[in-house]
Amino acid sequence: MRHLQAYRDTLDRSLVVVQTTNSSEREAVLGALEARRKLSTQHSSHRAYLGVAESRVVLVLDGDGAFSGAGAASRFLSDFLANERYPTPAAVVLCGVCWGNPSRSAVGDVLVASSLISVNRKVAEQSGLTTIPKTFETQLPEESVRELGGKNVIAPALMLSVEQLFKGTKARDELLEKFPNAHGGEMEGFVVVPACDSRLIPWLIVKAVSDFGDDDFERNAQGAVAERAAEVFIKCLRHIPINANNKDRLDELADVIRGHSYELRQEFFDFGGNLAVQVNEALRGLDTIISFYTGSLIQHAGLARQLAIVVKEFALNSLTHGRARRIRIEVDPHGVSLDDDGQAYPLENLAAEVKGRGGQGAWRGLKRDHVESGRLRVNNEARNKWRNSVRFDIDNAHPNLPDAKEKCRANIDPLSRPAIYVHPECSDVYIDIRLFEMMTLALDTVEEFEPLLESGKRLFVALTDRDIREKIEAAFPGYIESRKLILLQDGFADIPGPFSNL
């Protein structure tokens, strides 16, 4: 969570915080994000993830339900809001499942509540317990909430909140008799909403009805309806205003979360410990990212690994010798950039050092194996606001391949016809036939290339078998020559994305 402190100014009034309280809710929200990174927390029941969706940076806080336990998600969120070291959110959203009022909602309906009645406070009197309700209204504009309404989405909805799990019809009806206009109820808002209101933070409750809190209570529907709530939550993000002054810095942070770049800050490191170990861990998986985005494996099997080592050594030098406070490493389909705000340090100084250690040796090897051969071009001119910049350009023969791998992978099912499913909007398609153990299955799939090629799509085909390659080359010589069919023989089964093995 210390990363949130480092990005406090960037995320202030720009971060959207969403709370979940069980695995179904958490998995649904995380699955709806474009990308996310897990953060470390101090409590075993608390989980935190920083993600990106709809050009918004999202913090997912998850824990146990209700409020009484130390691992409660609402306690985690309340502590986060009270901690001045963390950024103030642009909005807080409670997302997940709830029980519904059978006269006003149905199982599967998503309730977008901008009005909440807290009924958790009770006073003991001679006549018995008396409920003291309190109503809260969100600061988000009502018209923005109404725009979220639609089929099976009730917006705005009225939600009840009480720390009580309803599993009996009698108890539920007693509550609904007092509040018949409520669409449903949940267990966290009575804590979170007052905490938001006291800090002038807009809030929403986006929860899907999984049951009616009656004698037929069960949890079977929670997973499916939580996914519906998560879909609506993503749509909510478009209606949450953020601090416009932070847009450029937010875009940079979003790139870090997506994996297009890394950012190292001085405060992330313990300078009393082994800094090389810490830098290596902070840039773990950089070689995989470089290979994924630049296609460096096609140029040379060792290029990505050697380049990643040099970048790590440069980053270590920036921290130790240049006293850099901020280092940014960006990877794109054409190469890698490293920028820092430390003391000016020309690249030729590294090559000229007599007592250089790892950095000098790594740089010498990269120059010998890749720069002098022309596979890699290096530019050391400082750019934009940075004091030091190093750019490594790689001649990528297939700049569209990373997008095809990430967004347009073909789904192959040998039991279906056609066996290959491609999203109709994809023009560049990645097809991996290396996982087929039988050549017959692989060749059956190859037979379906022709209609895809005739429709104008470009196919990137990953394979390992030389015989299959020869058959494809014989069957589609024109498409191969025109670069509409590109064969990638990497020698190992591909991973689904750049972070799958991290």
Image: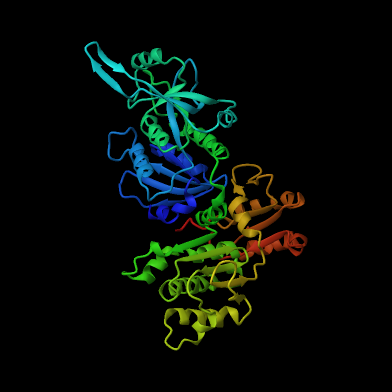
Residue most toward the bottom? 354
Please name whichever residue, 441 or 32, is drawn nearer the observer in this view of the structure.
32
- Image quadrant where residue 333 sits: bottom right
Query: At x 52% / y 36%, what residue is drawn?
Result: 233
Residue situated furthest top in the rendering: 127
Q: Is residue 101 left or right of residue 304?
A: left
Q: How is the image coloured?
A: rainbow
Residue 347 visible in the displayed image: yes
Quarter the C terminus occupies: bottom left
Task: Say which quarter of the image contains residue 3.
Answer: bottom left
- Camera-side residue of 352 and 343: 343
Q: Position of residue 133 (x, y in %)?
A: 36, 21
Residue 300, given in percent of the width and then of the height, sits at 58, 73
User: Looking at the image, which residue is at 60% across and 48% down?
Assistant: 412
Q: Does 378 sit left or right of 100 as displayed?
A: right
Q: Is residue 136 above or below residue 172?
A: below
* Count of picture labels: 0
The quarter of the displayed image where residue 271 is located: bottom left
Q: Residue at x 75, y 59 (%)?
A: 479
Question: Which residue is painted at 24% across and 10% down in the image?
Answer: 127
The percent position of residue 394, horizontal first and vertical second, equals 62, 71
Horizontal and vertical percent position of residue 158: 47, 23
Q: Examine the rendered structure and indicate whether residue 223 appears above or below residue 362.
A: above
**Vertical relation: 370 (above or below) 137:** below
Of 298 and 162, nearer the camera is: 162
Foreground pick, 482 / 179? 179
Residue 409 in view here? no
Relative height, residue 200 to residue 274 (above, below): above
